[in-house]
Every structure is written in structure tokens, then in C-alpha cells.
Image (spheres, rainbow, N blue to C red):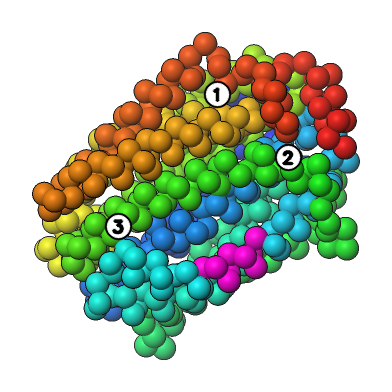
Amino acid sequence: MKSEENAVRMTEGSISRALIAFTLPVFCGQLFQQLYNTADTLIVGQLLDSRALAAVSSSGNLIFLLVGFFNGMAMGASVVISRFYGAGDEEKVRKAVHTVTGLGAVLSIVLTIFGVWASPILLRWMDTPADVIGLSNTYFSIYFAGVTGLVFYNLFSSIMRAVGDSKTPLYFLIFSSILNILLDLFMIGVMGMNVEGAAIATVLSQLISALLSMFWLMKSKGPVQLRLREVRFDWPILKDVVYNGFPSGVQNSIISLANTVVQSQINHFGYAAMAGCGAYAKIEGFAFLPIMSFGMAASTFISQNLGAGKTERAKGGAKMTIMWSVIAAELVGLVFFIWAPQMIAWFDSNPEVIAYGTGRARSNALFYFLLAYSHAISAVCRGASKPAVPMWIMMAVWCFLRVAILKITEPYENIQFLYWVYPLTWGISSICFYFFWRNDRWLRPSSRRGSNGGRPVRSRIQRLLHQSA
């Protein structure tokens, strides 16, 4: 079994073909992941009640608050491995694979302990209603007790995608998605469990996808083969992973913190608002699919080509992924805007729940092109080893400005203010990213360690890699 069989060498051939060959499996994988995340909500909403739906559907912001940092580290790992792979340095790829696996072990322990401890504290801080907080705490406690599977699946997937293999993670996600839905139906519909059944189903399916990914890497041949006895930290490579991953992780967590503040404001309006906005969030996840897929393609494409010294090719791929991401996200938003009431009703037929979900959808959906543009430029920056740029922009606009607006409008007790804060901050961040994007600022050399700074000369890349050895 060769890891190169499903890999896409993104430094050669047609740019559009390379991007499509990579993006389609990523999109399908994200689709199945979103489906099995949504399955919890749909099954809970149909088989249990609105309070259980509120407990599960409002979990996204809090989960991503804690998990988002570790997802950012996985992004950093992917960028580093992609750069080594593009430069043809297989020995560095091998060391990076085993360093990232060791990092995953440490991160999973930290996240498990902190997540189980912090969940009830954060739920109280978010002013979760008394008739929901018990169910929410049960769901989160089980989820974070088994979060190891999620951490390792994300890291192993980042290794595969770094060398252009986006198909293998798709196969594992399809299997685990189907399993998750079956377990949901069995534990809630047959065993009569409450939200704990949905949490257990999610944890088990994530664990199985992580194990499948690990066994695949162990059986693979080539630079990404995993040998458990060789798992150890290569400190220069670890520093490079942290340099590229830490800003993305901080960015994810800070944005999630701001969204958690929004969620705490929504909680003041009661369980119907929680359920309606939670159902909206699950459907909004489908708008993120093209954004995330093209973003992963952009980061991998740019990192591989800058590693190979092909700057003009990297620029062409960046422009293409930005355009495709914006168009696809807006088309999804248009569909959501038109059929929002029917989609929200899939989760809960309560008219009040539908009204809240539809109100948020019709305030946000037509502005998804702004969301896509900001995320696309962020992905380009990560691929060029400039992760600090999107971190600072997102922190300033999507966190501090967003929270400031909420605090100013809080006395008015109008949920529409909560809805409109999103497109407003998406627009401001897009303007900031535009000024950074123009004149190819993302390609300018960086003096920071661990960044190739978009330098187009292969020998310069190799000297940097040699110095980090």
C-alpha cells in the first residue's frame, strides 16, 4: 500500500486540475463530517424535545472554543509537511510525521482534562438556562472525555492532505459518518437514552476514524509511513509546527470565544432561541464546506509550490481558490436564504424555533461571500507561512470589535443586533484582508524563523530547512 497512490502532486501539471483533484475529496469529506454532526441534532430534535435540541445544537461554539486551538496546530503541521514534501526532502517529512504524532498525544491529554473540567464552568458563564444546563453538561462531559479520537483524526488527516492525499481521509469519514448515524438511532431510538446517547455515538465514530487513519499510515510506504516506535519530538521541526500552527490555533479559539459571548446573549432569549439559532448553525455549516475545502486546497497548494520554488504557480492557485470559494459560498447562501423556514423545520417544528432560526438565516446568508473571502485569504497566508496576519485581523475584528458591538447594543434586548454583528464584522475583515492581499504582500519575505516568507528560490528554501536541522 503506497501513500502516493491517492496523493496529488500539486507542483506539476494544470493548476485547476490539481486543485479540483484535491478539493473534491476534501469537500465530500467535510460534507460527511457535517452530516454526522447534523445527525445528532436532527435525531435529538425529532426523537427527544426542544430542550434536548437546545443542549446539543448550541454546543458548537463551546466545542470549537476548546478544540479550535488544536485544529489550528493541525493546520500548522500540514503547512510544514507540505513545504518539506514540495522541496523533495523526504527525511524531513518522516521526522515531521512522527513529531506531529507525539504532539497529538500531548494535546489530546491536555484537551481531555481541560475540557471535562472547564465545560460546567463555561456553561454557567454563558448563562445557560437552568432547564438546559444539566443536559448540556452531560453532553460536553462525555464529548471531551472521548475527544482523543477527534484530535488524532485531524492530525493524521493533515499529514495525508499535506502530501496531496485528500481521498483517504474521505473514505474513513464516510464510514464513521454512517456509523455515527446508526449509533444515534440505536442509542436514542432503541436504548431510550437522552443526549448522552448522541455524545457517545459521536465519540465512538471519531475514535474509529482516528484508528483507521493511524493503521493506514502505519501500512503506507514512503515518507509518511508511521512507525510508533519512532514517535518522538524533533525540536526544530516542532518549533516550525508551532510557529505555523499556534497563530491559527489562537485565531480559532479567540473567534470561538467571541461566538461564545454571542451564544451567551442568545441564551437570554430562552430555549427556543437557542434551538432555532442552533439549528441555523448546523445548516450554516454546509455553507462552510466550500470555504473550508478550498481553504485546505489553497494552503496545501501554496505551501508545496513555495517549497518547490514555484512562486508564480502559487499565485495562480491562490487567485483561483479565492474566486471559487466566494462564488460557491454565495450560491449556498442564496439557497439557504430562500428555503430557511423549511430547513429549520427539519430540526424542530415548533413555530417559535423556526422563527428564530429563519430570522438569523435571512440576516446572514446573503453575506456569505464576505465570510468566504476572509477565510480564503487566511488560507493563503497560512500556506505562505504568514499565519500571524489572519490571527491579528481576526482577533481585532471578529473578536474584540464583535464583542464591543454586542456590549454597546446589549441594553436594547433585540436579537437582531446579534444576527447583524456577523455580516458587519465579515465585511470589515474582508476590507483588511484586501489591503494585505493586493500587491502580493503575502509573498514578501519574512525574517521570522520557520517561515519561508513566500521566497521563490528553491535553494533558499533548502538553506532554511538545513538551518532548522
Q: Would you say 181 lies left or right of 287 here?
A: right
* Secondary structure under the numbered disc 1 in the rendered image: helix
**Region of the chain picked out in magenta, as a range:** 107-115
- Residue 190 is situated, as x and y percent measured from the top left of the image, at 40, 86
Q: Would you say 349 lies left or right of 133 here?
A: left
| Residue in the image at 31% along x and 29% along y | 427
**In front: mark 1 or mark 2?**
2
| Residue in the image at 50% along x and 43% along y | 251
**Residue 149 in sight from this viewpoint:** no
**Residue 233 in sight from this viewpoint:** yes
* Secondary structure under the numbered disc 3 in the rendered image: helix
| Residue under numbered circle 3 | 263
| Residue under numbered circle 2 | 240
- Residue 387 is situated, as x and y percent measured from the top left of the image, at 58, 34
Amino acid under disc 2: Asp
Which residue is outermost to the bottom?
Answer: 191
